[in-house]
Amino acid sequence: MKRVRLGLLGVGTVGRGVVDVLNRNGDEILRRTGYEVIVSAASARNLENASQFLGPAVKLHKDPLDVVKDENVDIVIELMGGITTARAVIEEAISAKKPVVTANKALIAEYGNDLFSRANAAGSIIAYEAAVAGGIPIIKSLREGLTANRIESVAGIVNGTTNFILSEMRDKGLSFEEALADAQRLGYAEADPTSDVEGLDAGQKLAIIASLAFGIRIQPERVHCEGITNLTESDLRAAEDFGYQVKLLAITKKRSNGFELRVHPTLVPAKCVIASVDGPMNAVLVNSDALGQTLYYGAGAGAEPTASAVIADIVDVIRLSNADKQAHVPHFAFQPDNLSDHPILDMGEVESSYYLRALVRDEPGVLSDISGILADYEVSIEAMRQRESDADTEGVDIVIFTHKTKESSINAALAKITELDAIYETPSRLRIELL
Amino acid sequence: MKRVRLGLLGVGTVGRGVVDVLNRNGDEILRRTGYEVIVSAASARNLENASQFLGPAVKLHKDPLDVVKDENVDIVIELMGGITTARAVIEEAISAKKPVVTANKALIAEYGNDLFSRANAAGSIIAYEAAVAGGIPIIKSLREGLTANRIESVAGIVNGTTNFILSEMRDKGLSFEEALADAQRLGYAEADPTSDVEGLDAGQKLAIIASLAFGIRIQPERVHCEGITNLTESDLRAAEDFGYQVKLLAITKKRSNGFELRVHPTLVPAKCVIASVDGPMNAVLVNSDALGQTLYYGAGAGAEPTASAVIADIVDVIRLSNADKQAHVPHFAFQPDNLSDHPILDMGEVESSYYLRALVRDEPGVLSDISGILADYEVSIEAMRQRESDADTEGVDIVIFTHKTKESSINAALAKITELDAIYETPSRLRIELL
């Protein structure tokens, strides 16, 4: 039996989850790996609380850098969150030739390119399964399980908060604000929910996923992020009436001239598997040429699901720590000297089918005006239906499903349609993915 | 760039899939791994056909053992199927210290215990991702992604043929025989469909899955297999009426006194993710203590999906071939000296909720007789409902949902119920999993 000693940076929710799972399942992990995994040193914001939780056997350091330098630490586990200190600590670990396991999605999204280069140069490993979709082994699947494939697209529900809110809105007929309040009460949403509900969290995860799928640099600044704050119950209901569910999807696609990178509420057919992913759960759907469609479903957050991913990474790192560099899976899934420099497409270049809903005056000529404008911008209509609008509003709902068209065309057409006299309010526009 | 040379045993559907994917995606695989992967030697039933397909650069051998011995072969790819020769060839490869990748589920189910022991003793690797659920990286996920977890249960749709048949029966109102004929016409079922429709194929896969989940020896002979041949449209419809879908599930659960290992048609709630897995697709649902529920969905068969798994294994093997044994993931997911010898439970010991449907004479006292017998055997009723039976039959349908009870109790009660005068035919009995 060998013993592997962890240096734990951060003893918050996830840090405690890791310690709890190691304590509870240490025997099972030993049965699997042949290694005893223990925490030998740690740092925390509140040293007293951490000391009470970790017990006297764990050496506590005020400065996280001292955990990295501690000679009784073999692997550095970065669970502090934040950017500046976490980055400095990981750089120090690379210099000290100690492998790093991190759950820090924001750090990897923003500085992963640089950190991976440094780790590659040093022959070291940064493992980050926990940074995307919590405990679901999606990074392992993309980097290793699908290695034979040319990946064509990935579409994921990678933010549990917004998926919970959307499920609540649909199931209970709540407004966004009401469902958000529920999510906050139940601990699924933070006091400041901006990063979740505006799609920024999903955007960071998408930037990492796209990098792994296509072998491109991580480019969070190039992700188009639209959140769910403007979604109305009327749109959710209309979508359902026509056989769709609305999900906040993080989508990346390979196109001949570049890559699409976008997060937005999306209509998906109610019959497809990802449409049945409800509540705070996550799922990632991958389309690839040999394997076809695969989907990975599970808890995208929470102390123990995240700990599950952190410990899986720890075991991988242990297995490979004495192997030569050839045995490492490349950080980006692709060889660092073989990344693609195809561009990320501007949002106007993105192609999609669209759902449009407009509340219009119930009078002759409106349909013909709208369809005329769409034709002017070469937007082809798949179906156009009238729908009873909500009882307390005047007018009728026109719902239009378009064929695939460019985002720039639909936006231009919509601007014209909004100017029509017969339109009561700015029409809704949602993208559709048939998946 | 390094070059890795494969010895391909079998140039049938899957073998050709592997060659096609390597030819088409060789550049992408090189981008990922830094290796060029080529087929250098092969054996096949029909050498002439194989030669035409593979071209002159591949050395063909009549005897598969000569492929293993070929000094230009680094890794042996066993895609012949069958047991006797495949086993001999893999044993030879182990002796020759050449890693093996195989898609041979029947061989691994029957002789995996022995082959893995030999490979462990020799420090060699047998990789077999393609043996279960085709291209879905479920073996990697169980062995590596979930390593921190105590796995509690696994329930999978691991046979695409039967899932396709069940979807057809439900969607088109076909009988089993009609749907089977469709499946055969479309190439989803073989001329002799016994292994699929009787649940034997799923049973072999389940034996492998359970071994990986719990660290037990592979015991296909201890799997209780019930197929779908006796399923009626009436039961599918009744299940749907009450909010369930019927799926052929391969289920393994850890209980305090042993493990359940069973394949049978199962009612699952229509709202859960696995219920939406239709057509020939596969999905495996894992319940584990830290991560909770995860699901892995994709194509469970077909040339290229299987090739995807075979090539992923090849890349793993390449990565680890120069690393020491410590870097290998154990064949069983657990250390070979640390397997559990907890028993597989007899089917009578299995606990489940049940759906019962009986066509009965429409007269007073019948319900009371049935519920009296269930009470005698301590089967507790959750719901009992009357349902219009099919137009062309006499009597009424009684549908009963029970609480969790032992299989032996329900069987004994059902034998008594069947003896009642008011019962027209042997009642249906299906197990329920809430998942």
Image: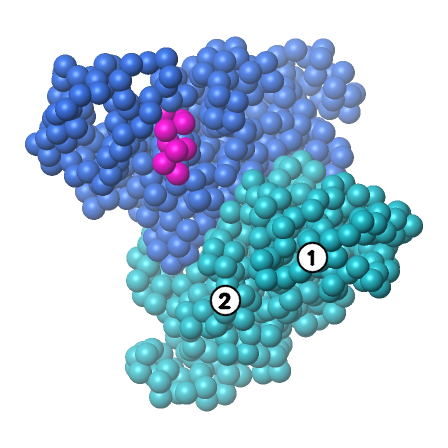
Chain colours: A cyan, B blue
| Residue drawn where x is 83% and y is 62% of the image | A421
Residue at left 79%, top 59%?
A422
The magenta segment: B235-243
Q: What's the amino acid at mark 1?
A: Gly
Q: Position of residue A345 (x, y in %)?
A: 82, 58
Secondary structure found at label 1: loop
Q: Is residue A305 above or below residue A55?
A: above
| Res. B67 in view | no
Magenta stretch: dominant SS?
helix
What residue sits right under mark 2 in the picture?
A: A179
The quadrant in which residue B306 appears is top right
Tell which circle, 1 or 2, labels the residue nearer the N-terminal end. Answer: 2
* Circles 1 and 2 on the same subunit: yes
| Residue B190 placement (x, y as % from top left) | 53, 15
- Mark 2, Cα crowd under 10 Å, few <14 / some 14-19 / many 20+, is many
Q: CA distance from mark 1 to mark 2?
A: 27 Å
**Residue A106 showing in the rendered view:** yes
Q: Amino acid at mark 2?
A: Ala
Q: State the residue in front, A148 or A67.
A: A148
Number of numbered discs present? Answer: 2
Q: Decide if residue B385 is on the left or right side of residue B11.
A: left
User: Label 1: how many residues lie within 10 Å, few (<14), some (14-19) or many (20+)?
Assistant: some
Instruction: Give SS at disc 2.
Output: helix
- B122 w.r.t. B79: above or below: below
- Residue at numbered disc 1: A395
Q: Which chain letter goes with mark 1? A: A
- Determine if the magenta segment contains residue A234: no
Q: Specify whether B99 is left or right of A21.
A: right
Judge left or right: residue B184 versus residue A172: right
The answer to which of A227 and B46 lies nearer the viewer is: A227
